[in-house]
């Protein structure tokens, strides 16, 4: 084990840049998949004949596939049918598809957990369906969704490490580059990388607990 | 697509078997580990509570890939030689056990305190009351979330592709790189994964509905 050799400024800076890529990928995918997930979840909740069932079927398919398969497909499969991505966009594409499906399910079950009487009362007071959704059902459902949504975000941050396999230069891939130079760097680098992921995700989960308590009071 | 299936059937089947096998190993292992750490988390002993909490928080918050690579690269170098399949399965077990511990803990807490008190006042020890009275009831409550963890486990077992674990995902890449039929190969493998996960996922949703109604 060579701690001082592993933790040189050059290596730490190199890893920090990797962390920055991990964070960028996570944040972009979180924003995109929240938008798509909310839309898909609402479509599925709304029971528009055939459309909702079809969306539900697609969502279920994506949810039940390994993320790694989707990642491989978007990086190695899509170019064969003429769609070419950089590693960065391929990763975002794959994570967004997968997370949108996961979030759609969270949104749907959150909305369905809201008492049906709320919708009926709002409708009979003259609100349109979309107004009911926007002002009555969604705000109440959101309270129940916060905890599962944040734990989904945490899994996303962890899952970004999978993009190492398509050589996205994220935290994990850069760690592999460093310990690939010298096996004595292995343990120090693994500890550092595990600790970094831990801190990022633990902060996220503390934040989720905080929001959850605020909403419940 | 049919030619790929015909020519690579043994490879696909081996992959499927390895995926199922590693998921089952990890399921059994993580149920045992998860129950132990759930008991730690609610134990009256402060040290045990701390160990349980630390275990769950650490392994829930670091990527599965990091855990698996530690078993694939670091452990063989310093302690004992293990192959990719075992490294992957052990990594999966540890990662999943942290989630299962949380599920089981929630299950135990949902069982009324009176059950434990009644068992204790009937002369059973703490562990006996846990094992014979509280845990059997808790397991019934947590079947749907455990099922969802198992679906995640099957999907996560694709991590074995990183460590040459010869699972379905690994075979997919090796078939894709020899036939150059990338999309068709991924389609076949995707369908195989869906055959494993979809029925389970619909059954769990059915169970959840049954319990809430």
Image: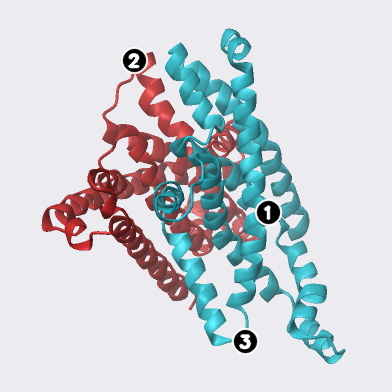
Chain colours: A red, B cyan
Q: Distance between the residues labelled 2 and 3?
A: 61 Å
Q: Distance between the residues labelled 1 and 2?
A: 44 Å
Q: How crowded is mark 1: few (under 14 residues within 10 Å), some or many (20 or more)?
A: few
Which residue in the protein does label 3 denote? B44
- Left or right, B56 with respect to A124, comes to left
Q: In this view, does A207 lie above or below A46?
A: below
Q: Which corner quadrant of the image does residue A8 belong to?
A: bottom left
Q: In this view, does B5 lie above or below B56?
A: above
Q: Are marks 1 and 2 on the same chain?
A: no
In this rendered view, identify the residue nearer to me: B117 or B85. Answer: B85
Q: Is mark 1 on a helix, strand or loop?
A: helix
Q: Which residue lies furthest to the left in this view?
A: A9
Residue at 42% x, 66% y: name it.
A205
Q: Position of residue A173 (x, y in %)?
A: 29, 43
Residue B103 visible in the shown view: no
Q: Are marks 1 and 3 on the same chain?
A: yes
Residue at 39% x, 66% y: name it.
A202
- Left or right, B170 with respect to A165, comes to right
Which residue in the protein does label 2 denote? A82
Which residue in the protein does label 1 denote? B28
| Protein chain holding label 3 | B
Q: Of discs 1 and 3, which sits in the foreground?
A: 1
Q: Is mark 2 on a helix, strand or loop?
A: loop
Q: Position of residue B117 (x, y in %)?
A: 78, 88
């Amino acid at each position: 084990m060579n701690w001082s050799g592993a933790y040189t400024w050059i290596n730490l800076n190199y890893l920090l840049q990797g962390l920055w890529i991990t964070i960028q990928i996570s944040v972009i995918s979180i924003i995109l998949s929240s938008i798509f997930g909310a839309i898909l979840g609402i479509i599925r909740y709304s029971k528009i004949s055939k459309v909702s069932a079809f969306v539900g079927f697609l969502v279920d398919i994506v949810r039940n596939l390994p993320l790694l398969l989707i990642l491989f497909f978007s990086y190695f499969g899509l170019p064969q049918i003429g769609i070419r991505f950089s590693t960065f966009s391929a990763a975002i594409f794959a994570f967004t598809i997968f997370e949108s499906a996961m979030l759609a399910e969270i949104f749907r079950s959150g909305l369905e957990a809201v008492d049906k009487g709320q919708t009926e009362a709002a409708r009979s007071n003259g609100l349109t369906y979309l107004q009911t959704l926007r002002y009555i059902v969604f705000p109440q459902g959101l309270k129940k969704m916060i905890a599962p949504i944040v734990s989904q975000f945490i899994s996303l941050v962890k899952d970004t490490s999978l993009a190492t396999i398509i050589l996205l230069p994220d935290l994990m891939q850069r760690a592999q580059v460093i310990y690939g130079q010298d096996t004595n760097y292995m343990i120090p680098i693994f500890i550092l990388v595990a600790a970094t992921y831990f801190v990022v995700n633990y902060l996220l989960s503390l934040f989720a607990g905080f929001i959850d308590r605020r909403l419940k009071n | 697509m049919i030619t790929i299936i015909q020519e690579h059937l043994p490879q696909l089947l081996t992959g499927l078997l390895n995926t199922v096998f590693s998921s089952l190993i990890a399921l059994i292992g993580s149920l045992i580990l998860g129950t132990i750490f759930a008991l730690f988390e609610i134990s009256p002993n402060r040290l045990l509570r701390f160990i349980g909490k630390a275990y769950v928080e650490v392994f829930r918050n670091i990527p599965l890939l990091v855990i698996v690579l530690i078993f694939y690269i670091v452990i063989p170098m310093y302690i004992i030689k293990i192959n990719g399949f075992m490294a992957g399965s052990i990594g999966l077990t540890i990662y999943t056990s942290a989630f299962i511990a949380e599920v089981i803990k929630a299950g135990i807490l949902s069982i009324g305190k009176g059950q434990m008190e009644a068992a204790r006042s009937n002369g059973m020890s703490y562990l006996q009351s846990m094992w014979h009275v509280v845990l059997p009831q808790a397991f019934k409550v947590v079947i749907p979330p455990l099922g969802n963890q198992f679906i995640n486990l099957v999907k996560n077992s694709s991590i074995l592709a990183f460590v040459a674990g010869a699972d379905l995902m690994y075979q997919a890449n090796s078939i894709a790189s020899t036939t150059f039929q990338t999309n068709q190969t991924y389609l076949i493998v995707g369908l195989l994964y869906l055959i494993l996960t979809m029925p389970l996922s619909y059954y769990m949703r059915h169970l959840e509905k049954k319990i809430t109604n």
